[in-house]
Amino acid sequence: MKKIIIAILVQVIVLFAGNYGDAFINASRPASVVGLGNMGVTQVTGIQSVLTNPAGLTQTNRNEMFIQYNNLFGMGYQHGLGIMTKHNEKYYFGITWNRVAIDELTERIDLFDYDLEERREYVREHFGKGETFSNSENVIHFSIARNFLHTINAGWNYDKFNIENPVGINIKLLSKSMYNEHATAKGAGIDIGTKFIIPGEDVFSIPRFGNVIIGFNLANVYQTPIIWSNDHVDMAKMKLYSGISLQQPIKFFSSVVWIMLENEKTKDESNFRYGFQWEFKDLLNVRFGRDLLNSNIGFGLKLPYKDYDLKIDYSLENHPIEMVHRISLTLFGRGKNVIK
């Protein structure tokens, strides 16, 4: 049985050359992103921004540490660690490690002829029975970012205004192990992200109008090669994430409201998302988001801990397989985000 499965895995690697999916990286996104329908190109800041737009590293003035562990549909798990710091008030550095793995998963028959409900029931009924195998996928991101300030002079009849332009780069190293390390792979790639933070009150001459934020993240620049142990090379597709959001303060309620739109674009397909976030006094966040498959909800809560603040983020994802809970923890020194 094992020889048959190994042979099938090798054939899949060959047949689907060039179509490697890095979905496990998306499965590692923090709860603050998942709760918004998997959006993060415009609004996420600090160490949690690495997987969605590394430019967000510059939008916090504090060191941060991130940790996450989550169960995936009762069949596998995901966990991540991350830390960020700044240097000379100009450069921001981050390193994160994310892992998605399946341990001791039971082998089962070919389920391609089953519909979704029949597959789900079969897996649940036969869970833990028969021979088992393990798979794992890992990615390490080394990130650097810097914030640039552009002064715009629109003419003699207008005031000058400043546009913040953070830019970030990820260098990522990937490692894969399939079926108890019978097939392994290594890879490396680059992501480049940027944002333009436009002061709405200055540009549109509307009192108390909030910031308009435009963001872009190009993942897998020129594609990311994945080299297997049999010397076969896969390529992870290049993806462009683009988005726009309004960050609108509401001083009467001591709140900030976010309204967000985002699009994920590859050569073959496009995925549109939208989301909403309400933030109260930088202490509580309530989130809702929608993408191609899911309607998700979530919240964030900041708690004081000695000389630090602990941020707890939670999301509930309405995945086609089943409802998925996700929790992320971020520990940071006392201070305020440059952009909340």
Image: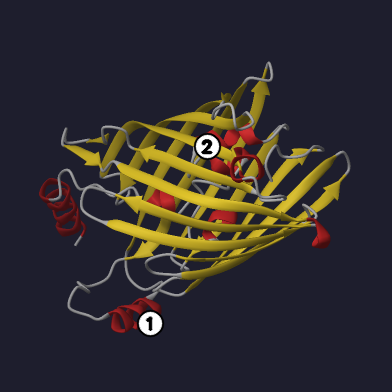
Q: Residue 66: in sight, yes or no?
A: yes
Residue 12 as seen in the image, left or right of residue 260: left
Q: Nearer the viewer, mark 1 or mark 2?
A: 2
- Residue 338 horizontal/vertical position (percent): 70, 37
Q: CA distance from mark 1 to mark 2?
A: 51 Å
Q: For mark 1, what is the residue?
A: 125
Q: Secondary structure at mark 1?
A: helix
- Residue 119 horizontal/vertical position (percent): 30, 78
Measured along the vertical axis of the image, is residue 276 above or below residue 117? Answer: above
Q: Residue at x 32, y 49 (%)?
A: 180
Residue 179 as seen in the image, left or right of residue 139: left
Q: Residue at x 43, y 57 (%)?
A: 103
Residue 311 as seen in the image, left or right of residue 153: right
Q: Secondary structure at mark 2?
A: strand
- Residue 194 horizontal/vertical position (percent): 48, 34
Circle 1/circle 2 CB separation < 8 Å = no
Quadrant position of the N terminus in the picture: bottom left
All told, the count of numbered labels is 2
Amino acid type at mark 2: Phe
Q: Residue furthest front?
A: 157
Residue closest to the eye, 1 or 321: 321
Q: Residue at x 80, y 45 (%)?
A: 309
- Residue 84 horizontal/vertical position (percent): 63, 31
Give residue 143's mark: none
The picture quadrant where one finds residue 138 is: top left
Q: Residues within 10 Å of mark 2 (few under 14, many from 20)?
A: many
Q: Residue furthest top?
A: 88
Q: For mark 2, what is the residue?
A: 196
Q: Residue 29: in sight, yes or no?
A: no
